[in-house]
Image (cartoon, rainbow, N blue to C red):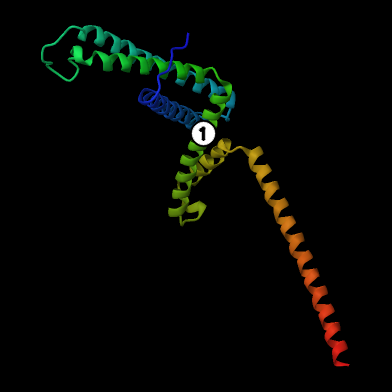
Amino acid sequence: MQREVGVGKSADAIAEGVAIATSAARLTVKNHILVGTIAQGGSFDVAKYMNDAHEALLALAAESEDAAELANKLRKRAHGRYSDPHGTHDYRDRDVRNLKKRAKQSSAVADRLREMADDPETLRFLVEAARAAAWGDVAGNLQSRLTVEAMRPDEDPDYDTMREARMQALRLVDLQALASEQRARKKNREKADKAAEKADKAAAKAAEREEKRAAKQLR
């Protein structure tokens, strides 16, 4: 059963916790993608990485639930204790309210992460974001490599390795989307060329009419 989520500052804390956990899950999936496609030479399988995202979110939900249980234990231990604390985590009765709030927030974060883990659309979006981040890392590394390279392939001892890395990096590219984008760009260029050609013809006709009009005036 889903727990009731608080409002105001509590809701903000929950949203922040979910955002942090989502970033951590995306990082986990990104690393899986880099290892699976680059290090191991595998293909990019959305379904596989959606499963990785599912497991990552569930693991983070479990961590958040553990944090809630710990806060509840500390709250019960702190109840009725009014002496001076002996350390940062030596809670007293005055901390009971905050510990209760912390437990509820952690539980709410866990509930939200489990919901996300069971939502295919959320998982797919997370995987696509992780793939974009992975490709960004690879592209950045390759660009850095290309920037410092000034030698011919036969002079570069790492050329074969880097070539293989570049070929494997293509597995991270959505080739279908890329092809669609290229077609759209070509279509736009063709439209622009036709419009320019039409404008040139219109200008030529206008100039011709103006020439004829000027010639008539001189007669």
Horizontal and vertical percent for residue 53?
A: 50, 23
The residue shown at (36%, 22%) is 10
The residue shown at (67%, 50%) is 185
The residue shown at (77%, 60%) is 194
**What residue is shown with label 1?**
129
Three-letter amino acid code of the residue under disc 1 = Ala
Tag 1 secondary structure: helix
Is residue 172 or residue 50 the one in the foreground?
50
Using residue 145 as the reference point, say whether residue 84 is left or right of it.
left
Horizontal and vertical percent for residue 99?
A: 27, 15
Give the farthest residue toward the front. Answer: 8
Q: Is residue 105 above or below residue 78?
A: below
Quadrant containing the C terminus is bottom right
Q: Residues within 10 Å of mark 1 (few under 14, many from 20)?
A: some
Is residue 3 or residue 46 the one in the foreground?
3
Q: Is residue 179 above or below residue 212?
A: above
